[in-house]
Every structure is written in structure tokens, then in C-alpha cells.
Amino acid sequence: MEWKMLSGVTFIILLAGDVIQPGAMAKSVAQTRPDPCALLTLEGAERIGGLPMTRTPMEGVFSRYQCSYQQKDGKAFEHASITFTLGGGHSKQDDEENWTNLKKGSTARGQTMDTKGLAGIGDEAFITRKKDPMSFQTILYVRKGGYHFILDAQDLKQEPVEALKEIGKKIAASL
């Protein structure tokens, strides 16, 4: 089995409860999985962020599951980012188990789960928020059919909830 080396560490990637391994399984999933950057476009990221963004290059297995944007021309300590992660697309049992684990894990770090105002976004959706002296983060989690996705907005200058809901609804409708 072949493993990717990043920053000198060998690892298996865990995304939203999925175990992604290089090789046949990853290639099979990649053939049927939507392109994450076709789902979250630069325009969508800028709508969420409320400021100019630039796409962060992703390589290898990451490019099959994630699309990331960061603040364009940010100064020191200005590092707003939007990351989209697409999970699921496996067996129904695996997808349900992954979604359940994702819900449990999202609140295990002291974040609160909010489901108000999220009806009509996929089959199920919730938002978590985290704020500490160094950063703040708002994350929209959505399940639609056999897929689930995460829209993670960090260190924005505006409250992203309404824009996250708007873009999340568009992404869910396209799955």
C-alpha cells in the first residue's frame, strides 16, 4: 500500500468520518464523486467571506474531497479562510454511520449545535460555532442523500451564517 508523506508524517486522512486510503478505493470514489471546487466556487467563497478570496491549491487525495479559499492579499494575522469538505458517496450504512459520527464529533470540542433556520438545506443540517481569543469559526454541516459536506468559515470580518446557508442550500441542491 502506498502512503502520502506531508510534513514528514505518514497518515490516513479522516474527513467527516471517512477513511480515505490511496489506491483502488480512493480511485473508485473519485470517479463518481463531484468535484468539490465545482460545488464551492470562488464566487461562493467570496459571498461567504465578504471579501476577495483566492483558491488554495490542493494536491493528491485532498483535491478529491476538499476545496479551500483564503483571504486574498491578507496582511499579517489576517487569514480568513473558507474550506469545503465533501464526504460520503459510499454504502448507505457507511454514510449513515459517518454522518452520526460527524454530529457527535462536531459538538465534542465544546461547540454548540444550532439547527434553527436550516430547514430546506439538504436532508439535515446544523451549524456549530467556536470563538476563542485567537480565532473564530462557524461551520455548516449538511447531509444530502448519500453525501455530507462541511462549509468551514474561519476568521471572517463579518458573520457568515446567512451566506453559509445560502451557499449550502445551492450546493445541496446540486448533489
Image (cartoon, grey):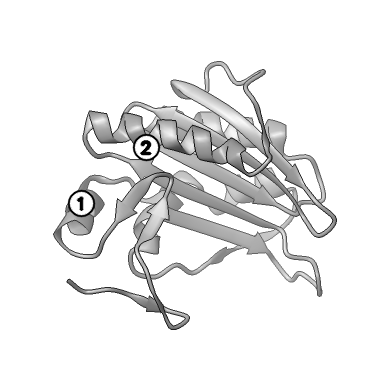
CA neighbours of label 1 inside 10 A, class few (<14), some (14 to 19), many (20+) = few
The image shows residue 21 at horizontal and vertical percentages of: 26, 61
Q: Residue furthest left?
A: 24
Hey, what amino acid is under mark 2? Asn
Relative vertical location of residue 118 with respect to residue 47 in this rendering, above or below: above
Please tell me which residue lies in front, 118 or 4: 4
Secondary structure of the residue carrying numbered label 2: helix
The image shows residue 17 at horizontal and vertical percentages of: 39, 44
Determine the residue positioned at 81% across, 44% down: 158
Please tell me which residue lies in front, 173 or 94: 94
Q: Earlier in the sequence, mark 1 or mark 2?
A: 1
Q: Which quarter of the figure is the N terminus placed in?
A: bottom left
Determine the residue positioned at 60% across, 36% down: 107
Q: Could you say which disc has been placed on residue 31 in the image?
A: 1
Q: Could you say which disc has been placed on residue 98 in the image?
A: 2
122 to the left or right of 12: right
The image shows residue 164 at horizontal and vertical percentages of: 63, 36
Determine the residue positioned at 66% across, 48% down: 153
